[in-house]
Amino acid sequence: MSQPVQPLKNAGLAAVLSALWCGLGQIYNGQIGKGLLFMFIQFINALLCFVFIGFITYPIMWIWGMVDAYRQAEELNKQQNVIQADA
């Protein structure tokens, strides 16, 4: 039985969504738990801004979220192309 065809993900859109709201790109990629975790971590980082460490951790997590969303979208597309080629 063949697997259902998943639409390809736009890696640029995934990165932009993560730039707008950390974790949103992961949710777009279908990684709901990971996206919610990124959002929770950013919330903690925002609170940490009150003790100044958040000024370091917040942008690091923000950039990591964008890069991760982009790379994961690319990986999902690559996997989908392999599945389609095997079908």
Image (cartoon, grey):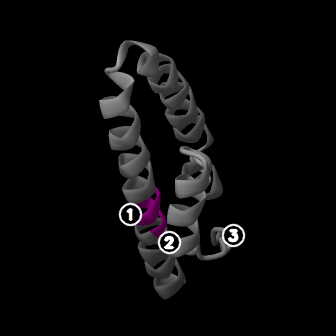
Going by the image, does 85 lie left or right of 31? left
* SS assignment for the magenta stretch, majority: helix
Q: Are marks 1 and 3 in contact (CB under 8 Å)?
A: no
Identify the residue at image location x=37%, y=51%.
63
Work out how far the residue at label 2 is from the one at label 1, CA to CA, in angstroms: 7 Å
Mark 3 crowdedness (10 Å alpha carbons): few <14, some 14-19, many ≥20: few
Residue 78, relative to residue 21: is it above or below? below
The residue tagged 3 is 4
What residue range appears in magenta?
A: 69-73
Going by the image, does 11 lie left or right of 27? left
Identify the residue at image location x=56%, y=41%.
35
Q: Are marks 2 and 1 in contact (CB under 8 Å)?
A: yes
Give SS at disc 3: loop
Mark 1 crowdedness (10 Å alpha carbons): few <14, some 14-19, many ≥20: some
Which of the two residues, 6 or 53, is positioned nearer the viewer here?
53
Residue closest to the far bottom: 85
The amino acid beneath tag 3 is Pro
The residue tagged 1 is 71
The residue tagged 2 is 11
Of discs 2 and 3, which sits in the foreground? 2
Give SS at disc 1: helix
Going by the image, does 68 lie left or right of 43? left
Looking at marks 1 and 3 on the same chain, the residue that comes earlier in the sequence is marked by 3
Give SS at disc 2: helix
Residue closest to the far top: 51
The amino acid beneath tag 1 is Arg
Residue 1 image offset from top left, x and y in percent = 65, 69
On the question of residue 75 being in view, the answer is yes
Work out how far the residue at label 2 is from the one at label 3, CA to CA, in angstroms: 21 Å
Q: Quadrant of the C terminus?
A: bottom right
